[in-house]
Image (cartoon, coloured by chain):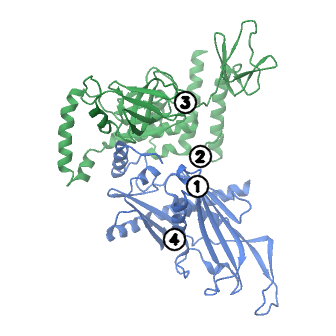
Amino acid sequence: MRGIQLSLNQTQKLRLQRALEQLESLSSKANSNASVTIADTIPVNYEDGVLKGHGTSELDGEVVATMCGVVERVNKLVYVRALRARYKPEIGDIIVGRVIEVAPKRWRLEINFSQDAVLMLSSMNLPDGIQRRRTAVDELNMRSIFEENDVICAEVRGFQHDGSLHLQARSQKYGKLERGQLLTVPPYLVKRRKQHFHNLEQYGIDLILGCNGFIWVGEHIEAKDPMVEDQVNKSEQQNTKSSKNFTRLEEQEQTYTPPETRQNICRTANAVRVLSTLGFNITVEVITETVELSSSLNLDIHEMLGSEFCVLVAEREAERRRLLTKKKG
Amino acid sequence: MVGLSVGEKHFIQGGIAQDLRSDGRKRLTYRPIYVETGVIPQANGSARVRMGATDVIASVKAELGKPIPLQPDKGKVAIYVDCSPTAAPMFEGRGGEELSTELSNALQRCLLGGKSGAGAGIDLSSLVVIEGKICWDLYIDGLVVSSDGNLLDALGAAIKAALSNTGIPKVHVAVGASGSEQPEVDVSDEEFLQFDTSGVPVIVTLTKVGRHYIVDATSEEESQMSSAVSVSVNRQGRICGLTKRGGAGLDPSIILDMISVAKHVSEQLINKLDSEIAAAEACEDES
């Protein structure tokens, strides 16, 4: 496998190679006809008119692939889909992004795509929860909602005419993400599923798998009712302002994440890092299995990033797939 | 480096205060260190060190030169660091120059001591060929390939590994040279002397975030630092150099505490580094 940046000793290298070969043999049976490399001919029935899509081209009357990938057919359309492609947004995708600019009536977010995404002020719930027309005062107070460098979870609403994305964050589950850490993985490892928000109750953490490859692991925060939040916010603000001069450090310490939750957050984050290094698809089931594997072995959290655990995860995944194919076949 | 939100900064500071950082390490735990030696065959010695996502390469080239008249019995060593633009977007063009000079100066201070050569971690008198006339000039170059915090420690480790990989060619001096003439020397291509690196120190950087110090900070943690103290300690536990970075002032008692913590951490680091270097050289011999 290319580019695994770990130093493995001889036995570990052999074990890892064996596990990866097992995985390859299990998966390649299904799609061996469909994968193509550049200049491969695509088998097409020429009597039905065929539409040549992305990644194909006509050469000497034959349809030839212009990139490496898997052939997909939709009715008459034939195209080649690359395996390790850049993030390709679709409407309804859940993504996690970082604010890079506060512009008139909108925020610009960086989402690991070729262009920045735009979140309009009108696509965002106001703090007081009332549905009303955004006024100039709202525009001036945009920074009180989201500032630069804030991490935000939102949904893709559509595409703008120049190809950049329009986002919306109108539901309670979208919005600013705090008290956790953001991880970046290659976008093709996160497949589209029904659920991208996961609340791992046994650990007390929230896991958000953004389709763009940004994964948020953080403390579980209940989605609050905006009406109640108003009063709670006001009293919190008063408290913080008064004691800011004296005990800022102690007060900060009181608001830190509790140690058990923090351990779970770090374990989950390391599990995601290991899966990303190995190039396995990232889903909630695989992540929870990896975390359970590490706790059952009583590994120190930072040892999860070492070579031994990496090899164990690869072997475990090979085992799991083998059992899965056994059940099917 | 991308910015961090207030929530993320709070999380990082909380982790350091609770002795559980973002990747699960304790405050005084290093990331896994990987050493490869002999990566540049044309150089006399070279090494590549990886600590997490930080990746640095160090190379040593030896050339014959004339010693400084004030110190005729010592060779010369020059250390220079270059931050490659592939490491971070801000290093493009001349952006990395400030950081490069800072790192070069810090390394010179930690490894070579003062201008008079006193307190050097590298023994310069072993580099002399003919006193007053010919000595070895060592040019140590460091390249930062990928930057994720703690560059000084990684460069110090890479230089130590590169020096242990260095072979200085044997020099045969022609007999019968008179006082004022330039003596003839014959640089051997076959025989090499291994450089003695038992006295070369390692550099331990302690980054102060809030009330606690951490070792081997990632670039996110470094963005939260108030100040950082880099201490170079050799195998005997003696301090060879000290550098402080960061705008916040430090109480003298804190500096003494940081020095003792650095000394304590350096013992494990030296052992780990020596074993990694030995393993890397064994690997290189095999291949």
Is residue B212 toward the left or the right of residue B52 in the image?
A: left
Q: Nearer the viewer, residue A198 or B80?
A: B80
Rendered location of residue B279, percent (x, y): 63, 57
Of all chains, the one bearing label 2 is A
Residue drawn at x 27%, y 23% as measured from the top left: A132
Q: Which chain is blue?
A: B
Q: Which residue is mark 3?
A: A87
Of all chains, the one bearing label 3 is A
Rendered location of residue A116, percent (x, y): 48, 34
Vertical position of residue A250 compared to residue A174: above or below? below
Residue drawn at x 64%, y 83% as measured from the top left: B68
Vertical position of residue B1 compared to residue B186: above or below? above
- Does mark 2 fall on the same chain as mark 4? no
Q: Secondary structure at mark 1?
A: loop
- Does mark 2 fall on the same chain as mark 1? no
Of all chains, the one bearing label 4 is B
Q: Quadrant of residue A176?
A: top left
Q: CA distance from mark 1 to mark 3?
A: 30 Å
